[in-house]
Image (tube, rainbow, N blue to C red):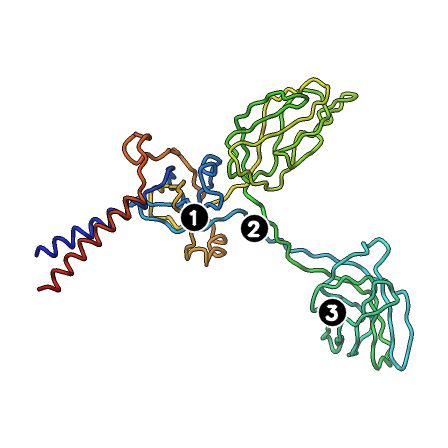
Amino acid sequence: MKKRIILNIAIFIVFSSVFAYAADFSYSADVKNHGEKNYKAVRLTAEVYNNLSENMADIMVFDNNNEPVPYFINSFRESRESMHKSYELELVNSFVKEDCFYYDYVLRDNVPSDVAATSMEISSSSTNFAKQLELWGSYDNTHWEKVQDDIIYNVDGNSKLNINFSGSRKYTCYRFKLFNNLERVEFSTVTLNYDGTLQNKEYFIETLAPEYTAEEKGNTTVIKLKNMKNLKLNKVSLKTGSTFKRNATFNGSVTKTLYNLKFNNVQYRDLTIPLESYLSVENEAEITIENKDDKPVEVTGVEVEYLVDELVFKGSETKNFTLKYGSNEINTPKSYDISNYKDQILTEGYDLLNVENTDKVSSLGNSEEININYKLIFNIIILIVAGVLGFIIIRKLKK
């Protein structure tokens, strides 16, 4: 009986220690559930990014019962668009050689020279024929490469007058080589077709008006943007009423000439520095404007555009969720089974939820001055439990 009690105490201590160690997150945020879809997504805010690790390993989703919820990260919306283009060819030469008939076609003058084609469509006034042919391609109407062998026919109302290519072709000239063409079959029109699917990725983008300070250093204006850590910056734009044309540099790496001019009542303005998903690793970023000997530019505002991610998870039966993030102990990104059927979930769709009430977590009440090393406590408790269990085993062996 005593052994059972001790074992229960040991198990309780183990679970308590695991809970204490797992709760080592610095921040939390509430997420209210809504909508009728089986899957939900929460779009991360700039404040969440600022307190995450760079690889986003230290973020988890919990349900009402404080149980972790598996998720995957989605960064864009993908769409597919069917595309069809047609290009007419014109006959430029025909001849007979060794009982074979040759017809040479080129793209018309008003058609771009670099075109892609996936098939060719032919029309002919001839009837009751079936012809074996070779199709050749060329870029200069001089050097020819064989494209493929095929058969065309028009017999008793049944016809096949199209040639499907095994891949996309970009020739500007095509040559037909017809065998046994005693009927002298000719073509009325020859058309190149391109049929494909255009895949578009629309990345999730948010805008932010960050806190900033502006100061003059020598002949430059230095603008310091706050709370930029871990943001994937797409572009940054200045707001100003000053008239100028000057070079501006972002974080010492991206330079562009910005201007705000007006001539003959026409405004000429470009106040945006493109950054192309620039990852800001520091909390503070800088924009430096070269003033030379001119009066400093008076900046009245800054707008930042950045890319955001969504955490997608199943959540139709939970009223609310909690995001927990900011941990020095978690270094490996989460890998859940739900990512294996990501495409099906994105096709089905999800409800988009909002991050609310972001708070800094305090382990003991409201006191932020007490710094507890949970890893050390966890290791100490494990040693105690191991000692207790070892003592029980030794006593049992002695008996």
The correct choice, above or below, for 320 with respect to 189 in the image is above
Q: Which mark is residue 273?
A: none
Q: Quarter holding the N terminus?
A: bottom left
Residue behind mark 2? 78
Residue in the foreground of this view, choosing between 179 and 232: 232
Mark 2–mark 1 distance (CA, rounded to whole Å): 30 Å
Among numbered discs 2 and 1, the one appearing first in the sequence: 2
Mark 2 or 3: in front is 2
Mark 2 or 1: in front is 1
Horizontal arrangement in the rendering, residue 61 relative to residue 75 (left or right): left
- x 82%, y 73%: residue: 126
Characterize the local packing of mark 3: few (<14), some (14-19) or many (20 or more) Cα atoms within 10 angstroms.
some
Is disc 1 in contact with disc 3, using a CB cutoff of under 8 Å? no
Is disc 2 in contact with disc 3, using a CB cutoff of under 8 Å? no
Residue 176 locus on image (x, y percent): 83, 72
Mark 1 or 3: in front is 1
Characterize the local packing of mark 2: few (<14), some (14-19) or many (20 or more) Cα atoms within 10 angstroms.
few
- x 52%, y 26%: residue: 211
Q: Amino acid at mark 1?
A: Asn
Residue behind mark 1? 331
Mark 2–mark 3 distance (CA, rounded to whole Å): 32 Å
